[in-house]
Amino acid sequence: MLDATAAARLAAGDGVLIDVRAAPRYRGEHEPIDPVAGHIPGAVNLPAPEYVTEGRFPAAETLRHRFAAVGVAAEAPVGAYCGSG
């Protein structure tokens, strides 16, 4: 589980914090689980269903491209959260 300190460091620019929930949950438009709607400030959205299909990940190069598009660098710390634990 990503603790609050780690989330704060990543969201403040010391790495990338990725919210892997569907875009409406990230934007706070729909929240069936969490007590507060929306995302951790500074987090980027990369919904898992967009890169995991039928229980499988795409080729490594495809993943590198997708993660680079949201600011993930090879050596930077990365944290991810789904909101439901």
Image (spheres, grey):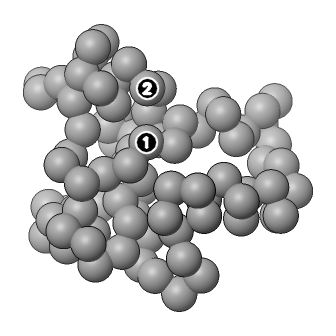
At 59% from the left edge and 82% from the top edge, which residue is drawn?
74
Report x, y in % for residue 23.
Answer: 43, 26
- Residue behind mark 1: 45
Q: Nearer the viewer, residue 83 or 65?
A: 65
Indicate which disc residue 32 carries.
Answer: none
| Callouts 2 and 1 close, C-beta under 8 Å | yes
Q: Nearer the viewer, residue 32 or 58?
A: 58
Q: Secondary structure at mark 2?
A: helix
At 36% from the left edge and 74% from the top edge, which residue is drawn?
15
Image position of 26 with respect to 2: above or below: above
Image position of 84 with respect to 81: above or below: above
Q: What's under tag 2, amino acid-wise?
A: Ala
The 10 Å Cα crowd at callout 2, few under 14, some 14 to 19, many 20 or more, is some
- Residue behind mark 2: 23
At 22% from the left edge and 30% from the top edge, which residue is drawn?
38
Q: What's under tag 1, amino acid-wise?
A: Asn
At 18% from the left edge and 24% from the top edge, which residue is drawn?
37
72 sits left or right of 8 in the view: right
Quarter of the image with the C terminus is: top left
Give the quarter of the image for residue 8: bottom left
Quote the CA–CA distance across marks 2 and 1: 7 Å
Report x, y in % for residue 45.
Answer: 43, 42
Q: Could you tell me if residue 33 is visible in this image? A: no
Q: Secondary structure at mark 1?
A: strand
Report x, y in % for residue 68.
Answer: 60, 64
- Badge 2 or badge 1: first in the primary sequence: 2
Image position of 83 with respect to 4: above or below: above
